[in-house]
Image: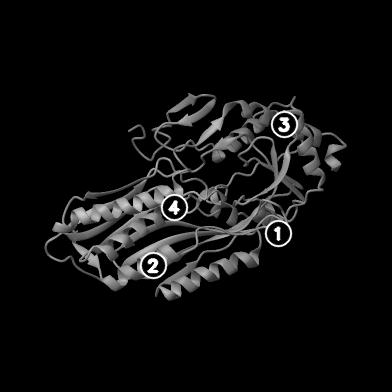
Amino acid sequence: KYIKSDDFSADPLQLRVDGGWLRATGTTLGADNGIGVAAALAVLEMGPEAKLPPIEALFTVDEETGLTGAFGLDGSMVTAKRMLNLDTEEFGNVYIGCAGGGNSVLEIQASRVAAPSGTVALELSVRGLLGGHSGINIHEGRGNAVQMAGIVASDVLSQVPGSKLVAIEGGDKHNAIPREAKALVAVPEEAQHSVRQVVARRADALREEFGQMETGLEVSAVVANGAPGEVFSAADASRILAALRSLPHGVIKMSHAMEGLVETSNNVASVHTSGGGVKITLSTRSSLGSALEAARDRLQAIADLAGGALQRGPAYPGWAPTPKAALVGLTVEKLAARSSAKPNILAIHAGLECGLLLEKCPCIAEAVSFGPTIVGAHSPDEALEIKTVAPFFEALLDILGELATPVGSKL
């Protein structure tokens, strides 16, 4: 165990270089978006000899947990006309648009009763999945551990007489595809072998479906510590597991306007059992505000069928692409000079703050987003490609230098 506490100022990351990539041991690296913050701070520390235009450096908190910093921004603080967003994860690409989104929480209240006598608690675990970013990786068809655990638990309850659902837990971030989850079930003591057979069959089916990508997938059933305690009634367990299996996860629609761009998606991000039922967190994204709410209407319909209540969090706007903007052309030019290939101009199916900041700060006429290469964001596998950091920072200085000239200031 390398990280001893949650106080990273007293217990810092243990960094390591692994084949040209910077990683952290035992936790996420935080390059998304620590590297953007570091670049901005480095620019602010440059001396008077540096060729720079007037700069307003904006740092926000809690981007990954709901853009709360950007939501709370007083836009009148900002007077800049152009925005360089240093929050992109593939060096050489220039992003000029992003999806909007919103989180929802589905609560299903349920009754609990004492576990039947003669039962033992078994933990049904799904682990070893890739996980990943719920926007950037959502189109890849990666496995969702929360939904897999729901499927495994459904199999046990339907195929092993006397089985009961005690709890189901998995996922911890709204913007990450869950990589681990577990369901706790109470089963007749003499039925343990039958449960393991059911779980093994489902594990084989999941490996057949996902094994080409999810090579680390593990599904198991082990005896849990302690007695089962209370369980959900059969009817309520059925409602909970049916909702988990019915909620859409993955791509809902591809864009008709931009080839290869996911337009609308949903992530079944987490499930947690409380004393009176379960809470399921959902993250919905779309380039179109109307499509975003239409997708959340579907979640509402499932909530109604499950006898639950859906709470919709505030939605944040998307960022409409402007490919012919002068700042886009300048950024492409400077990145191309620092790269071996011509940059791609793209839109991303993720919640960059740009859309919200542009809405909050009407003075900003143009915006672009770029950065070094980061993989595995929001997971312990996160890594920063070291060789892309210097050209990223040099291109940033090139762009700022051009904007500091009389011609560049008029762009």
Q: Is residue 121 shown left or right of residue 251?
A: left
Around disc 1, counting alpha carbons within 10 Å, would you say few (fewer than 14), some (14 to 19), or many (20 or more)? few
Residue at image position (74%, 33%) is 335
- Pointer 1 or 2: first along the chain: 2
Mark in front: 3 vs 1 = 1
**Distance CA(mark 4)–CA(mark 2):** 15 Å
Q: Which residue is mark 2?
A: 242
Q: Quadrant of the C terminus?
A: top right
Under mark 1, the amino acid is His
**Tag 3–tag 2 contact (CB < 8 Å):** no
Q: Residue at x 43, y 40 (%)?
A: 215
Residue 10 drawn above or below residue 67: above
Give residue 91's quadrant in the image. top right
| Residue type marked 2 | Ala
Whole-Å distance between the Cαs marked 3 and 1? 32 Å
The residue singled out by tag 3 in the image is 395
Say which residue label 4 marks: 144
Closer mark to the observer between disc 3 and disc 2: 2
Please identify the quadrant where the N terminus is shown. Answer: top left
Disc with the residue nearer the chain's start (4 vs 3): 4
Badge nearest the viewer, 4 or 3: 4
Q: Secondary structure at mark 1?
A: loop
Instruction: Indicate left or right for 219 with 343 as reference.
Output: left
Type of amino acid at the residue the image marks with label 4: Asn
Residue 88, given in percent of the width and then of the height, sits at: 63, 41
N-terminal label among 3 and 1: 1
Which numbered disc, 4 or 2, marks the residue that appears first in the sequence?
4
Q: Is residue 52 visible?
A: no
Q: Which residue is mark 1?
A: 256
